[in-house]
Amino acid sequence: MKKNPHRPVLIAAFGPPALAILRSWRDLFHHPAIIWFTEKGVDPARYRLIDTQMSIRPDEFFTEQGIRVVSSFLSDITADSITCINERTALHLQNNLDLLPPQIRIFSSGAAVTVALLCKETQVKTAEKVGLTVLPTYYLGRQTCKKMPDVPAASFPLCLRPSEPGAVCPGFKVEIVHSPAEFESFLSNHSIEKGHIIAQPFRQLPNLVVHGSRSIMGKPIGLQGFLVERKFEGITLTIRPMKLDPVLKSLCIHFTDEFNLVGNYHFEFLYEPETGEAFFLEINARFGGTTAKVAASGYIEPVYTLMAHGIILPHTNGKLGKRTISSKTAQIKYLYDTIYNKINALDYPDEPKAIRLLKTLWGLFYYSDDIFSWRDLRGSWALYYHNIRTKLKKQY
């Protein structure tokens, strides 16, 4: 393949999503570059996975001086675009665009869209508006947090989530309450600073993830469904491609049109295999936890992302494999938690311990890994080694 003359830059912490993007870019461009977020003593730049790279601490980046350091780097290498994985990073770049070189384009939806999509309440109400199926939803604001909302007993257990970052103190990502008394206890120990707590009935179901991109002209690109048959700590443990229902595909496109989203995204649904019904959970307009896993299955999310922002690339639908993708590291931790009875309600499916052990051992040997690649042994080893060093550093 003839390489593209553009010079994009990724800014991210070293992890599976960044490695997946890096692998794709090395095949596409002559001189891509990366700005690594790094902690003291753990610097991914030392692995030399790409010719042009620099490191910066997150606390330094989120200052005006940090942006000036990044800007100088972008000017020195004559970069023409920058993208990132984290929404906070995107917002900081967008809010300081005047400090970046004039030729730099930020590949994201823009600050207003990014802020709107960070609100789960806005997402749920938009999903209802466009016709996506949503579980019964209850909103607890500052005025209602200290008293029990009128939730039918049949709705328990409930899954609780904050509507936006910083909405609840102390913070949490997701919590399961199994009874009104447990719900009341949870509310008595939390205060709502802004927005709401979103409560929905908890359903023990697999997830359906829909990856896609939307171009600056509003054209949908590369929509593809993936079935999450096993979950660990509420996130994807295994994933495999599956055919996307045309009606659901159309509704996903309608949803992204409502926000005028530009670039890559992934929807999360609860999926009822017997009926094919998909219950909307959320959308993330960024790379994320499933990026490396879908890349390992052959889905070319970094390519679709660049195409969405107008970079002309050889059009391909990718070659999706049929094998299940997982993470060997997560499988080992899941095996450990199973042995020591640390499995909780967020771990799916609910199975006897012996079945969990057998399926996990099977997966360790049979499922493809989201990091390891024969085509990139150096990158695979670098990330494994980096993860080990980071964990050891935190322990000691």
Image: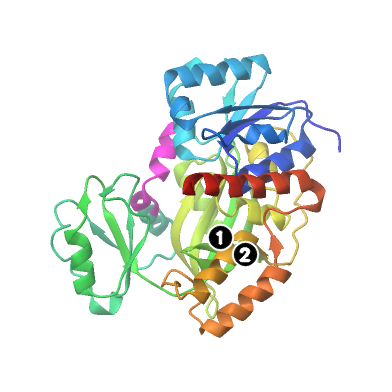
Name, please, the residue furthest toward the front.
396
Image quarter for residue 209?
bottom right
**Above or below, 387 relative to 366:** above
Q: Is residue 292 above or below residue 74?
A: below
Magenta part mainly helix, strand or loop?
Answer: helix
Residue annotated with mark 1? 209
Pick the residue in front: 41 or 88: 41
Identify the residue at image location x=75%, y=27%.
Answer: 31
What whole-number distance in Å separates the C-alpha atoms at marks 1 and 2? 9 Å
Q: Could you tell me the amino acid type at mark 1?
A: Val
Question: Label 2, on which residue?
Answer: 239
Determine whether 380 is above or below 352 in the image.
above
Q: Which residues are magenta?
A: 111-123
Residue 117 counted in the magenta span: yes
For disc 1, the neighbor class at 10 Å (few under 14, some 14 to 19, many from 20) is: many
Quarter of image, res 368: bottom right
Residue at the image position 25 percent from the left and 75 percent from the top:
179
What is the basis of the colouring in this image?
rainbow
In the image, residue 223 lies at what x, y percent?
A: 63, 54
Give amino acid for label 2.
Answer: Ile
- Residues marked 1 and 2 touching at CB (< 8 Å): yes
User: Badge 2 local density, few (<14 within 10 Å), some, or many (20+)?
Assistant: many
Left or right of 5: which side holds 244?
left
